[in-house]
Amino acid sequence: MGKNAGRCRNLSGGEKKNWRRWLWPVLLVLLGALAAFELLRPDLRQSGAVPVNDGSGTIWIEPDPNLPRSSLKSSDFDRLGSAIVYTGSGYAAYQGVDVSEWQKSIRWQEVADSGVDFAVIRCGFRRAVMGTLEQDLLFEDNYTGAGEAGLRRGLYFFSQAVSVEEAEAEAAYTLELLGGRALELPIFFDWETVDDPEARSLGVSGETVTACAAAFCRVIEAAGYKAGIYFNLQMGYHTYDLGQFSAQTLWLAEPGEHPTFYYETALWQYDHHGTVAGIDTEADRNLLFEKIEESKN
């Protein structure tokens, strides 16, 4: 240790007084700034705004009167092996998976025997750069296999639509692939940002995405099927105007031990890296919530 090292440890009386001399004014300035901020800030609670976590931190939102608030609590959930189970009393909850060609060949009877009740199957997608519409390579196998195993089936289309016209074309293509066959669950519009500097969808506004989703759902519903949208916390709070979808099925992607989204959703994707018997790759795991009175009908 050098000869000057003691200077960092021992302050003279004069130096201590200098500390006090500038420390108190600084604290007073900080306290004054904090008080001014509190006075100038709108009273969010009195305005009806509520704090929520959007996946990056706390934000304040004005609750949409068109959407019911979620009644789910963290105490309603428990982990059982690789699955999260609902232990509350307000809903009947069912285990499910969503799959695509990325899960490769699936042994659907094993999936069903493991306690999975439903599957949401990708039927097709739009390429992010070229914009072409393509069928999922294993859609037919998954649709048939899940049905033969007794699972309820829904579909999703991975969208990269940049206009209402493109979203309508995606819906029409989905209906073409389905060919009038039965579904027990909705067809979901799945629009996501893609990590590609050449992606056509870069910079698309929330208003456009909302309009695309609404157009997709209209075409699907006109054909006699139920429709819904898939989203994560960021898209749910910042991209979509969810109040426009009060009549559609909402599917939340929020990996974790329990959902925190402010509004009620019918499906919750709780694991992006789940393990399921009969699927040799990682798979997305989900819970489907049906209100007790609805599940009895």
Image (cartoon, rainbow, N blue to C red):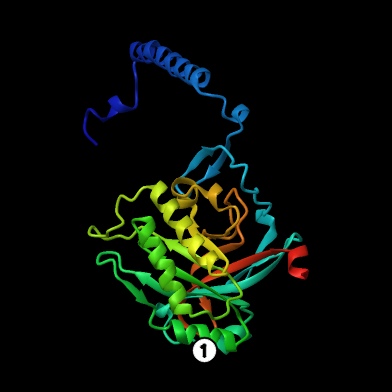
Taking the spot 58% from the left edge, 85% from the top edge, the residue there is 147
Is 286 on the left or on the right of 91, as rendered?
A: left
Q: Is residue 7 above or below residue 239?
A: above
Is 282 on the left or on the right of 226, as rendered?
A: left
- Please identify the quarter of the rendering in which residue 128 is found: bottom left
Give coordinates of residue 86: x percent, y percent.
68, 65
Taking the spot 69% from the left edge, 59% from the top edge, the residue there is 76
SS for dot 1: loop
Q: In the depicted view, which residue is nearer to us: 74 or 49?
A: 49
Q: In the depicted view, which residue is nearer to us: 63 or 59?
A: 63
Among all residues in the image, which is located at the extreme front? Answer: 222
Mark 1 crowd level (few <14, some 14–19, many ≥20, 10 Å Cα) = some
Q: In the depicted view, which residue is nearer to us: 119 or 52?
A: 119
Q: Which residue is mark 1?
A: 107
Q: In the depicted view, which residue is nearer to us: 6 or 28?
A: 28
- Please identify the quarter of the rendering in which residue 100 is found: bottom left
Q: Is residue 25 above or below residue 131?
A: above
Taking the spot 30% from the left edge, 50% from the top edge, the residue there is 203
Is 8 on the left or on the right of 184, as rendered?
A: left
Give coordinates of residue 1: x percent, y percent.
24, 36
Amino acid type of the residue that numbered disc 1 sits on in the rendered structure: Arg
Q: Is residue 218 above or below residue 110?
A: above
Give coordinates of residue 215: x percent, y percent.
45, 58
Q: Quadrant of the C terminus?
A: bottom right
Q: Is residue 120 above or below residue 159?
A: below
Give coordinates of residue 163: x percent, y percent.
35, 55
Taking the spot 36% from the left edge, 57% from the top edge, the residue there is 193
Q: Is any atom of residue 269 visible in this view?
A: no
